[in-house]
Amino acid sequence: MQEDDKSLAVLVKVLEQHATGVPGAREKLVEWADRWLAAQSAKKLRCFSAVGRWVEDGDIHNLALLRLDTALKTVCPQTVGAFRGLMYLQINRELTDHYRKYYGPEGIG
């Protein structure tokens, strides 16, 4: 079993724990998502280059992580794909909010 397979198996187990309400499972999911969000935030920020003028990828990463933690209090993803989709959604929402803030009708951009 490769390292990726092991971490994927751990993620599936933590998702099951979160679904059943095991204390601390949400925190483990947020901790697991931390590295993935960091890499994806930098990648997505390159696509939103106009936003990159005003914010750094670390800002997007941290704010998306906070959004994910809040979302996990009410949403219970059942699969790894659903969890990744939820993480991706938080990055997109954060970038969209920043774009609207800086380039909306009253934005400074």
Image (cartoon, rainbow, N blue to C red):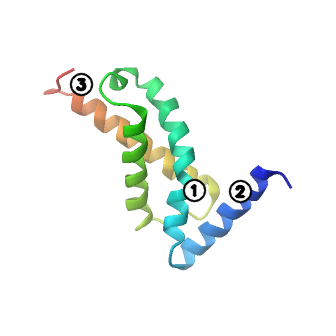
Q: Nearer the viewer, mark 3 or mark 1?
A: 1
Note whether residue 76 is visible. Answer: no
Q: Are marks 3 and 1 in contact (CB under 8 Å)?
A: no
Give the CA separation, mark 3 to mark 2.
40 Å
Along the viewing direction, whichever of 98 and 104 lies nearer the viewer: 98
| Quadrant of the drawing holding the C terminus | top left
Image coordinates of residue 62 in percent, x first then y, are 40, 46
Badge count: 3
How crowded is the residue under tag 1: few (<14 C-alpha within 10 Å), some, or many (20+)?
some
- Hey, what amino acid is under mark 1? Trp
- Hey, what amino acid is under mark 3? Tyr
Judged from the image, the secondary structure of the residue bearing numbered disc 2 is: helix
If you read the primary sequence from the N terminus, does the residue marked by circle 3 or circle 2 appear first?
2
Residue found at x 37% / y 25%:
52
Q: Nearer the viewer, mark 3 or mark 2?
A: 2
Q: Are marks 3 and 2 in contact (CB under 8 Å)?
A: no
Judged from the image, the secondary structure of the residue bearing numbered disc 1 is: helix
- The answer to whether residue 38 is above or below residue 66 is above
Q: Are marks 2 and 1 in contact (CB under 8 Å)?
A: yes
Note whether residue 108 is visible. Answer: yes
| Residue at numbered disc 1 | 32
Along the viewing direction, whichever of 90 and 1 lies nearer the viewer: 1
- Hey, what amino acid is under mark 2? Ser
The circle drawn on residue 103 is: 3
Q: Quadrant of residue 105?
A: top left
Q: Is residue 107 left or right of residue 54?
A: left
Image coordinates of residue 34 in percent, x first then y, are 52, 50
| Residue at numbered disc 2 | 7
Residue found at x 29% / y 38%:
97
